[in-house]
Amino acid sequence: MIFIISITQRCRSPIDAEVPEWSGSEHLYEILAKPSPIDAEVPEWSNGTGLGPVGLVPTKVRILASAFIIKMQIKEQIKEVSVVKCKDYSQKKIDEAVSKALKLIEFNPENYRNKKILIKPNILGSYEKNQIAITTHPSVVRAVCKIFKKVNAKIYIGESSFMNTDKAFKKSGIEKIAKEYSFNKKPIIFEQEKLIKIHDNKSKILKTFPIAEIVKKVDLIVNIPKMKTHSLARVTLGIKNLYGLIPGGLKQRFHKKAGGNKFSEILVDIYQNVKDKVKLNILDGVVGMEGHGPASGEQKKSGFILASKDTVALDIAASKIMDFNPKKIPAIKFSVKRGLYTGYGFELKGLKKLPVIHFKKPRELSLKSKLRRLFSREQPIVCDIEKCIKCGTCAKHCPAKAITLKPYPIIDKRKCIRCFCCMEVCPVNALSLGKPGDNMWQNSKNAEKN
Ligand code: SF4
Ligand code: SF4
């Protein structure tokens, strides 16, 4: 009823009643929204208000217009997520899948003609193995670059990895793409950029934090996460990928600030401050990671590219595909709680039914693990000494200074805050959550004795 009144108030003269029957509702809306030329002549029937009587507009017109407005309002609230099948990383298939995913959500690159855009892939670090499951695939970044190159956008590709971002860019194959497509012919390393401070009293934990100035200067951020599990945040998708906007070693310090689920409050603090720029999210779910994500898990072939204009909608859809309950993903839950997203629904585009591919949960989440925790028998972080190259990177990046090398890493459980940074930074994935009895645990035990 409210909508009917608002529309009829826009119909200012009897001339509006002559809206042609053939007009589609969209055209109709435009006509109704414009004042009629008769308005200029101070119509007698307007009672000095400039508004026409409701009865002068044919009922059919009013109903059509109202239905259209309601449809627009609902569309505003329900965010679309497209899911497109893509079996492998051949450039042709990726190009097609990304273009299709964007069309399905009605994202028009033309709106960014000559604008500045920042592409934010997930380049966690420089890994010797399993890069295909850890890092956004370069072919996805290339596909996005091609789309924005066509509209002459100024492209920037930026990241701050957990360590050695420049090395990580090289190893991921994305540095090459930055040289080819980006405006300044090289990747943007956030910790080397001019930083600005964000102040936000509505944040839960990070009331003030630095961010590279370019993040706020661009017209659009294209967020390109990977479909992975995460030992601390459960999953790492769109919201978590934005943690890479935080420059360098600060990420570890923030981990120390808030452990457990509170870490996800930090993720939402960051998200709410860049949300207005992140208007396109494309998820690389062709090959992802299950189990001990984000770096020590196993490859999981899912075969999908997802896209959404809304980061939370993307995360809800992706976590459902991974067979996680989005209500139990802290970053999604906190976003909904803070009013950054309404409910847990979304409109699926591209497929009739959302596929569900079971991703093994990180061990930390299993019932057994929770019971162990309850009885102070947490699953230990263990080192596979056959993989470990004794580089000391884990000890260097541990925010709680809980690791000593003897010569393999030994963790002081009293100091450890369970942030799992050590697992993320290890270049050879030698660290994982162990369980008594398995080989890794034995290896670690042996190391402890040495
Ligand atoms: S030992 Fe690992 S999990 Fe524990 S605080 Fe250090 S980096 Fe975090
Ligand atoms: S566990 Fe990994 S990061 Fe730590 S010393 Fe061994 S190889 Fe280096």
Image (cartoon, grey):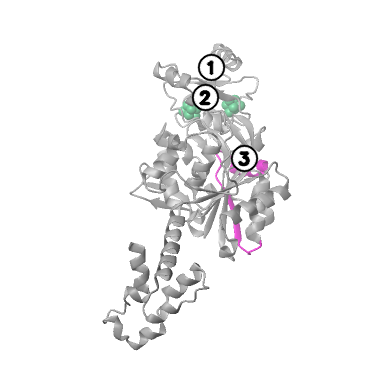
SS label for mark 1: loop
Judging by the rendered image, the residue that carries numbered circle 2 is 363
Residue at disc 2, CB closer than 8 Å to ligand 1: no
Look at the image and tell me in which quarter the N terminus lies: bottom left
Asked if labels 1 and 2 touch by Cβ distance under 8 angstroms, the answer is yes
Front residue of this view, candidates 180 and 30: 30
Judging by the rendered image, the residue that carries numbered circle 3 is 135
Instruction: Give the image location of residue 373, x and y in percent.
Output: 42, 20
Identity of the amino acid at label 3? Answer: Thr
Judging by the rendered image, the residue that carries numbered circle 1 is 435
Q: Check the image and report above or below for 298 versus 94.
A: above
Q: Is residue 345 visible?
A: yes
The residue mark sitting in front, 2 or 1, is 2
Residue at disc 1, CB closer than 8 Å to ligand 1: no
Instruction: Give the image location of residue 282, x and y in percent.
Output: 58, 48
For label 3, count other residues whose C-alpha is less than 10 Å away and answer few (under 14), some (14-19) or many (20+).
Answer: many
Front residue of this view, candidates 391 and 302: 302
